[in-house]
Image: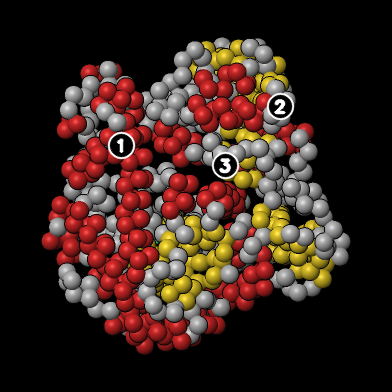
Amino acid sequence: MYYGGDYNPEQWPVEVWAEDVTLMRRAGVNLVSLGVFAWSRLEPAEGRYTFEWLDQVVDLLHAGGVRVALATPTASPPPWFSLAYPEALPVTRDGVRLSHGSRDTYCVAAPAYRSACLRIAAALGERYGGHPAVAMWHVHNEYGTWCHCEHVAEAFRSWLRGRHGDLDALNEAWTTSFWSQHYTDWRQVLPPRATQYLPNPGQELDFRRFLSDEMLVAFAEQKAVLNALAPGIPVTTNGVFGGWVPVDHARWARSVDLVAVDHYPGSADLGAEEETAFFADLARSWARAAGRRWLLMEQAPNLIYTGARMLAKAPGRMARHSLSHVARGSGGALFFQWRAPRGGAEVFHSAMVPHAGPDSRVFREVCALGAELPALSEVEDAAIEAEIAVLWDAECWWALQSPGRPSTDVDYLDLVRAAHRAFWRAGYTVDFAAPDSDLTPYRLVVVPGLYLVSDAAAGAIAAYVEGGGRLVVGFLSGIADSRGLVRLGGYPGAFRDVLGVRVEEFHPLPPEIVAKLSTGDTGTMWSERVNVTGASTVAAYVGGALDGLPAVTRHGYGAGTALYVSTRLDDQAYGRLLVGEARAVGVAPTCAGAAAGVEVVRRRAGDTSWLFILNHSDVARQVPADGVDLVSGASVTGSVRVPAGGYAVVREAPSRPSIH
Ligand code: GLA
C-alpha cells in the first residue's frame, strides 16, 4: 500500500528536508512524487543541470525508507525555455499566444518542447535510473492541455491523414458539403480556431481525439527514454479527469505501466462520496481492461479549490475517501501535497503538513491513516466483485460537447453519473466497460448517452442481449457512427432493432418543464416521440405533445431483454428502474443489511473475501459481517459496529460462495 504525496523540497530550505523525512516516517509515508514542478531548479539554463540538491533529497528519502515516484518536470517549462523558444508557447482558440507565468505553458506538438522534454527525461533517467529509492517514474503532470498553433495544425493534418487516409474521406466524415467547407488541399485543414458561427462538429471531435493521441505520443517518447535507461522501473503519469481534458484515459491505460489518477470531488455533501466511488470505479475499470494496477496519485487532505471558495473536509472524511479508492483497487492513497507552501498560486491548497505544522488535526489524521493502511496490504491482489456494467466512452462525451446539439443541458458525464449514483445509493458495485468490450460477464448492462457507436460495438451489444443479457439504454444513444454521422431511418439508430422502438423526433425539455409519466414518475431535460415496433410500454408520457406515447419501453430480444428510457428520469425513479432490473436478473446489493449512507464494497481473492464498510452517515451503524476487522484487529460476529464517519475492513469468515 503506497502512502504519501507530492513532495516539493525545492520550495524549502535544506533544514526543512530532514524534518520532512522525520515527519514522513511518523506518518507512515512510503512513497513521494518528487520533482513534478522542479524543472527550473534542475536545469536553470539550457543543458546546465543542477542535480546536486536532488541527489541529497533522494538519498535522504532513501535513508528514511521513503521511496520515490520520480517525476519528469515537463508540465512546467522554465522561463528560459519560453524566452528561447517562444513558438513553443501555447496558442488559444482565439489566437492568443499565452505567456510564461503559470504552469503548462507549452505546446505539446512543438518540436523544441518535445526535444527539451526528452533531454531532461534522459538526464534524470541516467542519473537516477539505478537509485534504489526510485520505485517508479512519474512522467509529466496531468496531461490535458490545448493549443491551436501552427505546430498543432501540422501535427493535426498528419494525424487526420492517418485516420481518414485521404481528403475525400475527411470531407465525408466532416460533412464539408455543409456550409461550403469542402477541402481540396491538406494545407486548408486547420485546428478548430475561433470562427464566425458554429464550428464543424467533426473537426471538433477529431481535434480532441488528435490531442489525446498527440499527448500520448509525447508521453510514450519519454517512457521509451526512461525504459531504455532504467529497465524494469514502471512508468506512469497522473491522469486528470474533467470535461476540459482531451484525454481518452481508457485508451491511455494500455500505454502506462500503472494507471495513476488524481481526484478532487467537487461537492460538499454526500455527492463527494458518490463522486469518489464513481471516479474510483472508472479508474479501476480502465486499469482492469488494460490489465494494469491502479493508484490514487493525488487527492486533497483537506481544502480544495472548487471555484469561488474552497471546500474543507470534515474530520474522518479524508480517510473514508482514501479507503473508498483502496476498496476499489487503488494500490494506496497519495495526496497533493506533502507540505503546504508559503506562497505560490496554490498557497492555500491543503497539505498533509498544513501551514499550522504537524501539531494539527490534519496531520494527526494523516498519521492515523498511515498507521492503518499496512494492515490492508493483504487485499492487494483481490478482485472487486461487480455483475453490472455501465458503458463509458470518452468520445461520446466529446461528441456531445460539440455546439449544435439539440440541448446544451444534456451532459454525457451527468448521464453516466446518474446511472452510477443509482447503483451506488442502492449498495451495488458496478464496473465501467468500453462499448466494444466483452459484456458477457455482466448480468445487466446500462448504456447512458452512447451518442457515437461503431457498427461493431452496436452488433456486440445486440448479441449480448440476444444471448440472454439485460440491457437498459438511455436517450441519445446509438445516434451516430464513429465519425459522428447520424444513422438514418429513426433514432436511436444503432439500437432500434434491439430495443424494438423507432423515434421520429426529439423533444428536448426547457429547464422549467417536467414531463409527467403514467407511473407517477417524472422526467426532465429530454423527451422524444417514441413509436414501439415490438417493444411494450412500461411508462407513457402524460399530457403535452407526447401525451400517451411511450417514455420507457421493454423489448424481448433473443434470449434477453432491452429497455429504453427516453427521458432523464428523476433520480428516485431511475434508481427504482435500475435496481428493479438488477433484482430481476438476480443481482443483489453487496450487503443487503447496510443502512443508507453506508458504502460497502467486497473484494475477493480465491477463497478469501474482504468487506470494506464506510459509514458516511452521522450515526453509528451495525452492519452485517463475520470475520476480523483489519482496522481495529477485533473479531466480528454477526455484525460490526461502525461509528459515525468511521470504517471497517472485515476479512470475512470463508462462508460466502463466489458469484463468478
Ligand atoms: C492537480 C495537480 C496538482 C495541483 C492540484 C490542485 O492534482 O496535479 O499540481 O494543482 O491539482 O488541486
Residue at image coords 27%, 62%: 118
Q: Label 1 amino acid?
A: Gly
Q: Position of residue 457 (x, y in %)?
A: 53, 31
Q: Are the residues at dot 1 and dot 2 in contact (C-beta closer than 8 Å)?
A: no
Q: Nearer the viewer, mark 3 or mark 1?
A: 1
Quarter of the N terminus within the rendering: bottom right
In-image side of 635 versus 27 (left or right): right
Name the residue tied to disc 2: 560
Q: Is residue 148 visible?
A: no
Looking at the rendered structure, which numbered label has been put on residue 637?
Answer: none
Q: Label 3 amino acid?
A: Ala
Mark 1 is surrounded, within 10 Å at the Cα level, by few (under 14), some (14 to 19) or many (20 or more) other residues, namely few
Mark 3 is surrounded, within 10 Å at the Cα level, by few (under 14), some (14 to 19) or many (20 or more) other residues, namely many
Q: Closer to the N terminus: mark 3 or mark 1?
A: 1
Q: Quadrant of residue 194?
A: top left
Name the residue tied to disc 3: 433
Q: Position of residue 524 (x, y in %)?
A: 56, 27
Q: Marks 1 and 2, Cα distance to the nearest angstrom?
A: 39 Å
Q: Marks 3 and 1, Cα distance to the nearest angstrom?
A: 27 Å
Q: Marks 2 and 3, Cα distance to the nearest angstrom?
A: 19 Å
Name the residue tied to disc 1: 162
**In this orientation, which residue lies closer to the viewer: 107 or 156?**
156
Residue at image coords 21%, 40%: 153
Q: Label 2 amino acid?
A: Gly
